[in-house]
Image: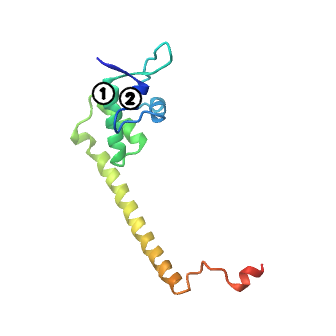
């Protein structure tokens, strides 16, 4: 079992444990690590893998609560592709809803920009507005 100091983990490409390492410890993503006499946190290699998994789940659109629950299921031995698939389906639904919202918003911005280019966007001050 190898241990790494928290400042050593900061040098690992694609892995940042600050400040989320502390935040995730409070939320249940990470167990509280032991500390050296100088106060540095010591992380087991399995913690590095756990952080990487949590980051991967986050990049796939899972919320922190969903990540904590997925890791808990994994820790308890209840996680399988079959039992966890729904989490990805929920994340996908959220992403597709957001894409639809952004697509609608993009259309509105394009329409407003076209109106603005024609001098009718409604953003410019009118002579009556400046008198107030």
Among all residues in the image, which is located at the extreme front?
A: 11
Q: Quadrant of the C terminus?
A: bottom right
- The correct choice, above or below, for 87 with respect to 115 in the image is above
In whole angstroms, how far apart are the C-alphas of marks 1 and 2?
26 Å
Neighbour class for label 1 at 10 Å: few (<14), some, many (≥20)?
few
**50 relative to 127 in the view: left or right:** left
- Along the line of sight, the residue nearer the viewer: 79 or 41: 41
Q: Residue at x 44, y 31 (%)?
A: 21
Tell me what residue is drawn at x 50 percent, y 78 percent: 112
Please name the residue shown 44% across and 23% down the image: 32
| Near-viewer residue (124 or 72) | 124
Seen in the image, is 90 located left or right of residue 108?
left
| Residue linked to disc 2 | 9
Determine whether, in the image, residue 94 is placed left or right of residue 81. Answer: right
Residue identifier under label 1: 76
**Which residue lies most toward the right here?**
132
Q: Secondary structure at mark 1?
A: loop
Q: Position of residue 39 (x, y in %)?
A: 50, 18
**x then y, percent, for residue 127:** 71, 85
């Amino acid at each position: 079992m190898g241990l790494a100091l928290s400042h050593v983990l900061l040098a690992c490409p694609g892995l940042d444990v600050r400040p989320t390492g502390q935040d995730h410890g409070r939320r249940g993503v990470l167990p509280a690590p032991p500390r050296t006499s100088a106060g540095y946190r010591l992380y087991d290699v399995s913690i590095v893998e756990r952080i990487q998994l949590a980051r991967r789940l986050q990049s796939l659109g899972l919320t922190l609560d969903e990540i904590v629950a997925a890791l808990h299921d994994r820790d308890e031995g209840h996680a399988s592709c079959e039992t966890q698939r729904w989490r990805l389906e929920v994340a996908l639904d959220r992403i597709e809803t957001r894409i639809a919202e952004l697509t609608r918003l993009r259309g509105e911005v394009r329409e407003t920009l076209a109106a603005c280019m024609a001098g009718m966007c409604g953003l410019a001050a009118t002579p009556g507005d400046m008198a107030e």
